[in-house]
Every structure is written in structure tokens, then in C-alpha cells.
């Protein structure tokens, strides 16, 4: 769901000549984020294993804690960069015009 939204935004918010660059940067960011996340989770799991090689409950707890911290940090960053929308004047009709790809 997140990937679909960012792909749509990466096309709609740039000039037509910059669409390919925007999509490429977005895909690279998604791929790097997935790779870094998988590396962190696998490192947490590998540091919490039993003698038979299975992941312990603590490994899963640390992995979920790391996911929660990253999600909360992302939400905080999103709130920092949020800009307040200008309120329309009373009695005016607001038409939403947007570019579509």
C-alpha cells in the first residue's frame, strides 16, 4: 500500500520531463530501505539464536521493537515536514485540480 502511494506521488508531483528520474529515485529508496531493514532484522535474529539455530523469543521481540522504533521515527519526521493547509474563505467552493499521469 505504501509503495503504491509513493509511486503515484513520485509521478504526480514533478514536471513531466523529470518523471523518469523521480520514479528511479523512489524505486532506489524503496529497495535500499527494504535491504537495510532485512539486514537489521537478520542481524537481530542471528544474535538471538539457540544452540540448534532457531530464533529465540527475545530475537523476535527485538526485531519487532526495531520495526516499531523505525515506524515511530518515520511518523515523527512526517509530522515535522507537514505543512498546514490554507483554509478556504467561507462560502467559496474549492476545486481540486491535479495532474494525472
Image: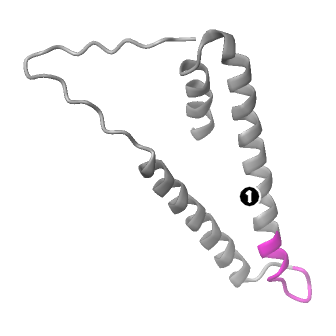
Q: Residue furthest bottom?
A: 51
Q: Identify which residue is drawn at 85% across, 76% down.
A: 46
In the displayed structure, 19 sits above or below 83; it is above
Residue sitting nearer the eye, 31 or 42: 31
Q: Is residue 48 magenta?
A: yes
Q: Quadrant of residue 20?
A: top right
Locate residue 44 relative to residue 91 in the image: left or right.
Answer: right
Q: Residue at x 85, y 87 (%)?
A: 50
Disc 1 crowd rating (10 Å Cα; few below 14, some 14-19, many 20+) is some
Q: Position of residue 33 (x, y in %)?
A: 72, 50
Would residue 8 be counted in the magenta stretch? no
From the image, tell me which residue sits under label 1.
37
Extreme residue in the right direction? 52
Where 89 falls versus 17 (above or below)? below
Compared with 6, 62 (above or below) is below
* Drawn side of residue 85 relative to residue 72, left or right: left
Task: Where is residue 5? Give x, y as percent.
Answer: 55, 32
Name the quarter where the N terminus is drawn.
top right
Q: Give whichever of 20, 83 is nearer the camera.
A: 83
Residue in the foreground of this view, choosing between 56 and 12: 12
Query: Residue 26, image x and y in percent?
Result: 69, 33
- Return the x and y of residue 73 as percentages of the image width and height: 53, 61
Quarter of the image with the C terminus is: top right
Give the residue drawn at x 8%, y 22%: 90
Q: Residue at x 54, y 22 (%)?
A: 13
Question: The magenta stretch spans which residues?
Answer: 43-53
Amino acid at each position: 500500500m505504501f509503495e503504491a502511494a509513493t509511486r503515484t506521488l513520485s509521478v504526480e508531483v514533478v514536471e513531466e520531463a523529470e518523471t523518469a528520474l523521480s520514479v528511479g529515485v523512489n524505486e532506489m529508496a524503496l529497495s535500499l530501505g527494504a535491504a537495510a531493514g532485512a539486514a537489521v532484522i537478520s542481524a537481530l535474529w542471528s544474535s538471538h539464536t539457540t544452540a540448534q539455530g532457531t530464533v529465540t523469543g527475545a530475537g523476535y521481540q527485538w526485531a519487532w521493537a526495531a520495526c516499531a522504533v523505525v515506524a515511530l521515527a518515520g511518523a515523527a519526521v512526517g509530522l515535522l515536514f507537514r505543512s498546514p493547509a490554507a483554509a478556504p474563505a467561507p462560502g467559496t467552493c474549492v476545486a481540486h485540480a491535479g495532474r494525472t499521469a
